[in-house]
């Protein structure tokens, strides 16, 4: 079992940190956190939503159920489909990701943000995500993706600066071409 509890926010001069206690039957940090620039603090909800996607994958890898406080019903519903896809891909690759039970009560999400963003690697999935989103939401709708997040160390190893520079340039070109 992986359990998330004691979610809190700590505001500093330069950032707000949202953290949660994590208890698990496998070695995980006692506390997980996300830092957001202080200027965006009005848009930060102090809830379990950001912890669900990350810990869902950990739970799938270790075949452990996940228990969280209230989360967005839309996010919880989306996780069901994501787990189906990850399990199918995992089976094809000979890995062992498996769907897990997620226990959390639903809490309607309060719209807080003025804009949306998405992780972007330049691959098929992230490109499709942006293009589908732009077909769905018109300019000016806060749900329309306006920001791309490219994380060095996720798809490209931290020590591979040459490849990351190429990926970054490709992401910039895509962003300019699609007004992101």
Image: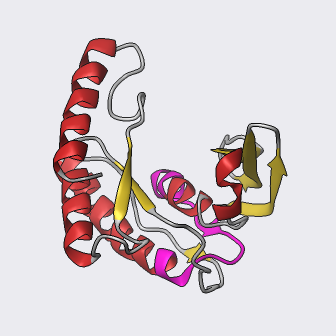
Q: Position of residue 26 (x, y in %)?
A: 65, 46
Q: Is residue 159 above or below residue 155?
A: above
**Relative horizontal placement of residue 95, taking residue 102 as reference (left or right):** left
Residue 171 appears left or right of 155? left
Which range is magenta? Answer: 57-75
Q: Where is residue 165 shown, x and y percent of the image? A: 28, 20
Using residue 79 as the reference point, say whether residue 171 is left or right of it: left
Is 160 on the left or on the right of 35, as rendered?
Answer: left
User: Is residue 68 covered in magenta?
Assistant: yes
> Can you see residue 66?
yes
Q: Identify which residue is drawn at 68% across, 70% down.
A: 68
Position in image of residue 155 (x %, y %): 33, 34
13 or 128, which is in the foreground?
13
Q: Nearer the viewer, residue 93 or 55?
A: 55
Which is more toward the observer, 39 or 95? 39
**Residue 1 visible, this angle:** no
Quarter-wise, where is residue 112 in the image? bottom right
């Amino acid at each position: 079992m992986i359990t998330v509890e004691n979610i809190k926010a700590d505001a500093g001069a330069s950032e707000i940190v949202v953290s949660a206690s994590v208890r698990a039957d496998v070695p995980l940090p006692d506390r997980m956190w996300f830092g957001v620039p202080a200027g965006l603090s009005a848009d930060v909800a102090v809830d379990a939503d950001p912890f669900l996607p990350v810990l869902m994958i950990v739970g799938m890898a270790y075949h452990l159920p996940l228990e969280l406080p209230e989360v967005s019903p839309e996010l919880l519903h989306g996780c069901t489909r994501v787990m189906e896809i990850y399990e199918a891909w995992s089976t094809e690759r000979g890995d062992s990701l498996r769907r897990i039970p997620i226990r959390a009560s639903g809490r309607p999400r309060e719209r807080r943000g003025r804009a949306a963003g998405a992780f972007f690697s330049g691959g098929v999935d992230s490109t499709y995500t942006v293009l589908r989103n732009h077909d769905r939401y018109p300019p000016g709708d806060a749900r329309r993706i306006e920001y791309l997040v490219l994380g060095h160390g996720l798809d490209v190893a931290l020590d591979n600066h040459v490849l990351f520079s190429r990926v970054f340039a490709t992401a910039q070109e895509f962003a300019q071409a699609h007004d992101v």
